[in-house]
Amino acid sequence: MERYNRILEKQPREIVLLRGSGCIYKKCTFCDYHSDKCSNEAENFALNSKVLSRVTGEFKELEVINSGSVFELDSKTIELIKTTCRTKGISTIHFESHYLYKNKIPALRQEFKDFDLKMKLGLETFDYDFRETKLKKGIKEKDAEIISEYFDEANFLFGISGQTIQSMERDIQLGLANFERICINIMCKNSTEIKPDKQVISDFINNLYPKYKNNERMDILITNTDFGVGD
């Protein structure tokens, strides 16, 4: 499992994949990432310390992900993230969170008030019925402005049966209108019941990828390890 890398394109930054107690939601039909977890905080901190020791501060920007939300990292890891970023001169930190933690985000921003904190939401799509009926995402809000109120960035998931060129482009346009940055993830085969749809993926690659691939506010991950972390 690779847990550290450097992202060199568009928005250069370092990225770390840390380990926490695990996603408390675990109902998304497309996701099996929550298996990267441990209930022992001491073991998690030991692992996370080794990963964070590799951070250099080269780009003054750090993205921190884990298989769940930032709120599932132990308190000692959170403190070490702060210390590491101060020591290495990092000014911008990116965290991820499920929407169910939205009311805890203001306190986190206050805790990290010395940094430019960017919160990323795993939204997957603005299509409410698709998101909640097929993906079981657990975001009951429909209004794009309200959804984005607590978040600066968002992940979207493309390449699933039922999506179209039109629906994917709508997500991109709404994403760019409501968030500072968006990340498009193409569905990859995993252990869940949701499988990649080759035709939908082909439609994206042929019709939308050329149009948006150079957009500086978008990351596009064709495989789930394109950021260089994970396995």
Image (cartoon, helix red, strand yellow):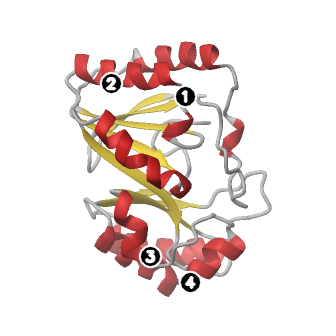
Label 2 packing within 10 angstroms: few (<14), some (14-19), many (20+): some
| Residue 164, numbered circle | 4
Quadrant in which the C terminus is drawn: top right
Q: Mark 3 near mark 1, Cβ–Cβ under 8 Å?
A: no
For mark 2, give the secondary structure: helix
| Residue 32, numbered circle | none
Q: How far is mark 3 from mark 1, CA to CA?
A: 30 Å
Label 4 packing within 10 angstroms: few (<14), some (14-19), many (20+): some
**Residue 153, picture quadrant:** bottom left
Q: Mark 1 near mark 4, Cβ–Cβ under 8 Å?
A: no
Depth-wise, is mark 2 or mark 4 nearer the camera? 2
Label 3 packing within 10 angstroms: few (<14), some (14-19), many (20+): many
Q: Position of residue 74 (x, y in %)?
A: 54, 25
Q: Is residue 201 left or right of residue 209?
A: right
Mark 1 residue type: Glu
Q: Is residue 77 left or right of residue 216?
A: right
Q: Earlier in the sequence, mark 1 or mark 4?
A: 1
Q: How far is mark 1 from mark 4, CA to CA?
A: 33 Å
| Residue 82, numbered circle | 2
Q: Which residue is mark 1?
A: 2
Q: Mark 3 near mark 2, Cβ–Cβ under 8 Å?
A: no
Q: Earlier in the sequence, mark 4 or mark 3?
A: 4
For mark 1, give the secondary structure: loop
Q: How far is mark 4 from mark 3, CA to CA?
A: 11 Å
Q: Which residue is mark 3?
A: 171
Mark 3 residue type: Asp
